[in-house]
Amino acid sequence: MIRADLDQLPSYVPGRSIPGAVKLASNEVAAAPLPNVIAAIRDAAAGVNRYPSNSATALLDSLGARLNVPTGQLAVGPGSVALCEQLVQATCGPADEVVFAWRSFEAYPIITQVVGAGRRMVPLRGDHTHDLPAMLAAITPQTRLVFVCNPNNPTGTAVPREELVAFLDAVPNGVLIALDEAYHEFVTDPAIGDGIALSRGRDNLAVLRTFSKAYRLAGLRVGYCVAPEPVVTALRKVSVPFGVNSVAQAAALASLDVAGELLAHCREVAAERDRVRTELLAMGYAVPDSQANFVWLPLGERSTAFNEHCQAHKIVIRPFAGDGVRVTIGDPQENEIFLAAAREWRSVRG
Ligand SMILES: Cc1ncc(COP(=O)(O)O)c(C=O)c1O
């Protein structure tokens, strides 16, 4: 009954949860939703006997006003990962290909294979950044979609605006670029651009953002996409009806009312990120500059052992065997617990 090719499909590995442990595995913001958002969730709960707005009209209106984007160029979905998948569904059939960097967000190869499209994975450069010229060279007549994850998960590295613009200008018109900005709100380097500003006047750029990280709603699943109208129309065609539930819509709407406070907190997280990186560098770890709410330790073959060391200290991080570990920035106390474990690892393991 089941498609034979699904046997080869790697499963998405969610960050583990261990009771009582410090959870630095899933790039969430450690702080709870703000009180007005919790109140909106409570109020919306009383109406869940009804279907949600399929068009998420109020949320689209508010997002559109905030971003200065017409609502016809906006789509929402149950997490930006759902929108990533919808972009593959909307652009690719089995004969088509998707290009993305590797290592990058681990959902890209999975959703590509689920749709049955081919994939070209272009290695990151030695400094863990996207190799955009190599990605350009990997585009073939079969390519329909290119993912650029900026900042990149799991390395935290980001492509500067000028390099990105040169890439956007060079990608052929018939290829859609999906600029995944799930971590945009943590960017502090002024050289990194804003995808939504860059998307104006382009007809082959879709920008993905999420309420899961900066907006603290990972458990409710809301993401959005800013794209040219024909792309948004196609996204709506392939989406599951009522994908964003009514509680999630209400919470996202309420969180836009307090965006200033949420974004100010992101700057605090970014300052913590820079502090954690500086401390790790001083301990002798290699850590690329991160513009996201996590840091990447390219520990290679020692990644699994480092992860086990952290687990023994009741810290859950995200290991990528043979490659590195990704550590989410938590609150300052959680970060201290991680730094102490990292310091101990250096003194014991060198
Ligand atoms: C780069 C990137 N894109 C998209 C997502 C998906 O986020 P969500 O589906 O929660 O919006 C994640 C989640 O970790 C991510 O790291």
Image: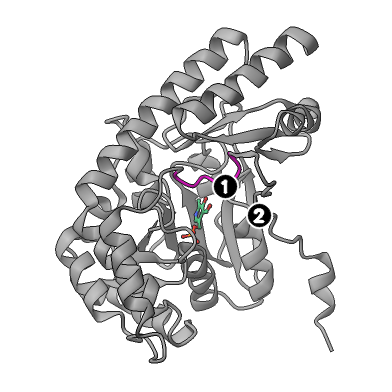
Provide the secondary structure element on which disc 1 rests: loop
Marks 2 and 1 close (CB-CB < 8 Å) = yes
Judging depth in this view, the residue of 22 and 286 nearest the camera is: 22
Asked if 181 appears above or below 310 in the picture, the reply is below
- Give the residue drawn at x 45%, y 66%: 220
Residue 224 drawn in magenta: no
Residue kind at label 2, given as amino acid type: Pro
> Would residue 192 be visible to someone looking at this image?
no
In this picture, residue 96 sits left or right of residue 168: right
Q: What amino acid is labelled 1 in the image? A: Ser
**Quarter of the image where one finds residue 235:** bottom left
Quadrant for the N terminus in the image: bottom right
Principal secondary structure, stretch drawn in magenta: loop
Q: Which residue is mark 2?
A: 14
Label 1 crowding class (10 Å Cα cut-off): few <14, some 14-19, many 20+?
Answer: many
Q: In 3D space, how far apart are the residues under numbered discs 2 and 1 (Cα atoms)?
A: 7 Å
**x%, y% of residue 153?**
54, 44
Image point 65% across, 49% down: which residue?
15
Q: Magenta stretch: give its range.
A: 24-29
Residue name at image x 79 percent, y 33 percent: 304
Q: Position of residue 225 (x, y in %)?
A: 36, 65
Indicate the position of residue 208 as horizontal and vertical percent values: 39, 59
Q: Is mark 1 within 8 Å of ligand 1?
A: yes
The residue labelled by disc 1 is 26
* The C terminus, quarter of image: top right
Query: Can residue 135 be seen in the rendering of this structure?
Result: yes
Judge from the rendering whether residue 107 lies leftward or rightward of residue 70; answer left or right.
right
Is 57 situated left or right of 315 in this image?
Answer: left
First in residue order: circle 2 vs circle 1: 2
| Count of numbered labels shown in the rendering | 2
